[in-house]
């Protein structure tokens, strides 16, 4: 996903990024959640990931990429959705 602004502080860093790293970061979280909390824990991680990716995809459609504010919003929305999904078992 492209960065929204060429003049942003993160622009030089994003030229060398690898798309596989986010996937590799999610795998251990999914494994730990599945072992510790079972299906509900894994569901929480999956829901959090889907909501975070959807947030960045929405920003990409609206402003042509993402910014630090978009990533912050993706974190908050994903975390909230994941916690709600994981807590649904109670």
Image (cartoon, helix red, strand yellow):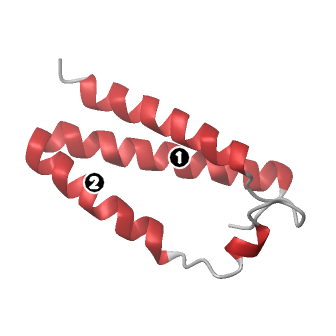
* Residue 19 as seen in the image, left or right of residue 83: right
Q: Is residue 69 above or below residue 88?
A: below
Q: CA distance from mark 1 to mark 2?
A: 15 Å
Q: Is residue 66 above or below residue 27?
A: above
Q: Is residue 18 above or below residue 66?
A: below
Which of the 4 quarters of the picture holds residue 60? Answer: bottom right
* Residue 2 as seen in the image, left or right of residue 86: right
Q: Position of residue 6 (x, y in %)?
A: 88, 67
Tag shown at residue 28: none
Which of the 4 quarters of the picture holds residue 5? Answer: bottom right
How would you rate the neighbour count of disc 1 (Cα within 10 Å): few for under 14, some for 14-19, many for 20 or more?
many
Q: Which residue shows up at 76% across the image and 63% down it?
A: 3
Residue lying furthest top in this view? Answer: 90
Q: Which residue shows up at 60% across the image and 77% down it?
A: 17
Q: Position of residue 38 (x, y in %)?
A: 11, 42
Under circle 1, the secondary element is helix
* Residue 53 as seen in the image, left or right of residue 80: right
Under circle 2, the secondary element is helix
- In the picture of the structure, the residue carrying the numbered disc 1 is 52
Q: Position of residue 78 (x, y in %)?
A: 48, 39
Sequence-first disc among 1 and 2: 2
Which of the 4 quarters of the picture holds residue 87? Answer: top left
Q: Position of residue 83 (x, y in %)?
A: 34, 29
Q: How many marks?
A: 2
**Looking at the rendering, in which quadrant would you find the C terminus?**
top left
Of discs 1 and 2, which sits in the foreground? 2
Q: Which residue shows up at 15% across the image and 49% down it?
A: 34
**Looking at the rendering, in which quadrant would you find the N terminus?**
bottom right
Please tell me which residue lies in front, 69 or 42: 69
Q: Which residue shows up at 19% across the image and 57% down it?
A: 31
How would you rate the neighbour count of disc 2 (Cα within 10 Å): few for under 14, some for 14-19, many for 20 or more?
some
- In the picture of the structure, the residue carrying the numbered disc 2 is 29
């Amino acid at each position: 996903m492209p960065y929204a602004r060429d003049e942003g502080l993160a622009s030089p860093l994003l030229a060398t990024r690898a798309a596989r790293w986010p996937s590799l970061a999610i795998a251990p979280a999914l494994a730990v959640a599945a072992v510790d909390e079972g299906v509900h824990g894994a569901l929480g991680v999956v829901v959090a990931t889907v909501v975070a990716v959807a947030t960045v995809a929405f920003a990409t459609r609206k402003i042509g990429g993402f910014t630090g504010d978009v990533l912050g919003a993706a974190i908050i929305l994903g975390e909230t959705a994941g916690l709600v999904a994981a807590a649904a078992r109670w």
